[in-house]
């Protein structure tokens, strides 16, 4: 992955804010259990931190990553591939 300098890309204040939020959330809440992550997410929402809104009850900020492939930084939801058992063990 190329750095922003290598790509000659400048970040807007909104992009920097998203980087700061993402790194702070993982630094402060990365070791929390699922129930505590939900509470942490709700705490951030109450403080009007600009994070993605919940799509379902158990979804939190920890289910998102920052997509830097476009000209702006966007929140993208992590959607794991569907696991299929192997035909032979």
Image (spheres, grey):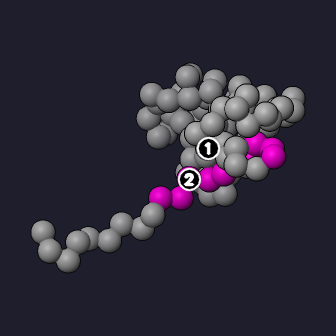
Mark nearer the N terminus (1 vs 2) = 1
Q: Quadrant of residue 15?
A: top right
Residue 15 shown left or right of residue 35 in the figure:
right
Q: Quadrant of residue 42?
A: top right
Residue 12 shown left or right of residue 6 in the figure:
right
Residue at 56% over, 53% down: 78
Q: Is residue 73 magenta?
A: yes
- The Cα–Cα distance between marks 1 and 2, rounded to whole angstroms, is 7 Å
- The secondary structure that dominates the magenta segment is loop
Q: In this view of the protein, can residue 26 be seen by the observer?
A: yes
Residue at 47% over, 40% down: 34
Image location (x, y in percent) of residue 16 = 78, 28
Q: In this view of the protein, can residue 48 be seen by the observer?
A: no
Q: Secondary structure at mark 1?
A: strand
Image location (x, y in percent) of residue 82 = 42, 67
Residue at 61% over, 44% down: 65
Residue denoted by label 2 = 78
Image location (x, y in percent) of residue 40 = 60, 32
Q: Please, which residue is most extreme toward the bottom here? A: 87
Circles 1 and 2, Cβ within 8 Å, touching? The answer is yes
Q: Secondary structure at mark 2?
A: loop
18 to 78, vertically: above or below: above
Residue denoted by label 1 = 65
Query: Magenta segment, which residues?
Result: 71-80
């Amino acid at each position: 992955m190329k750095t922003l300098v290598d790509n000659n890309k400048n970040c807007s204040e909104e992009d920097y804010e998203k980087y700061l939020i993402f790194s702070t959330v993982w630094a402060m809440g990365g070791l929390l259990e699922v129930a505590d992550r939900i509470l942490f997410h709700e705490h951030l929402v109450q403080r009007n931190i600009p994070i993605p809104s919940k799509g379902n009850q158990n979804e939190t900020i920890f289910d998102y990553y920052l997509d830097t492939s476009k000209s702006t930084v966007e929140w993208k939801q992590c959607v794991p591939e569907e696991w299929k058992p192997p035909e032979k063990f």
